[in-house]
Image (cartoon, helix red, strand yellow):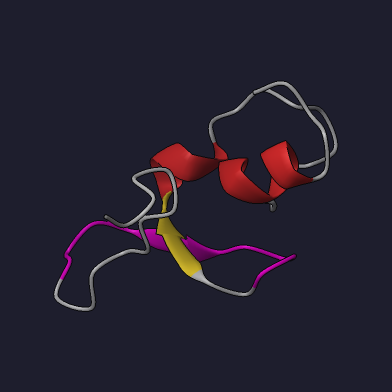
Amino acid sequence: MPDPTHLYAPKTSTEPTKICEKCRNPYTLDHFQHGVEGQDCVCRRCLQVMGYKV
């Protein structure tokens, strides 16, 4: 079963997307609403891997 926290934006999605600066994958904007200062362009999954509590 795939990791539900690592859902890339579907190619057919009409939602606005943003590219994560760390993993370079497109995510919907809710993946960047984590509240960590200075990491606005990093997705939630990468922040968890780097040790942040999000």
Residue 49, picture quadrant:
top right
* Residue 16 placement (x, y as % from top left): 33, 58
The residue that appears at 42% across and 43% down in the rendered structure is 5
- As drawn, is 25 to the left or to the right of 3? right
The residue that appears at 43% across and 59% down in the rendered structure is 27
Based on the picture, tell me whether residue 7 belongs to the magenta stretch. no
**Where 19 falls versus 15 (above or below)?**
below
Residue 8, picture quadrant:
bottom left
The residue that appears at 66% across and 69% down in the rendered structure is 23
Residues rendered magenta in the picture: 13-23
- As drawn, is 19 to the left or to the right of 42? left
Residue 43 visible, this angle: no
* Count of marks placed on residues: 0
**Where 21 falls versus 5 (above or below)?**
below
- Judge by depth and name the residue closer to the eye, 4 or 12: 4
* Residue 14 placement (x, y as % from top left): 17, 64
* Quadrant of the rendering where the N terminus is positioned: bottom left
Q: Main secondary structure of the magenta part?
A: loop
* Residue 40 placement (x, y as % from top left): 70, 43
* Quadrant of the rendering where the C terminus is positioned: top right
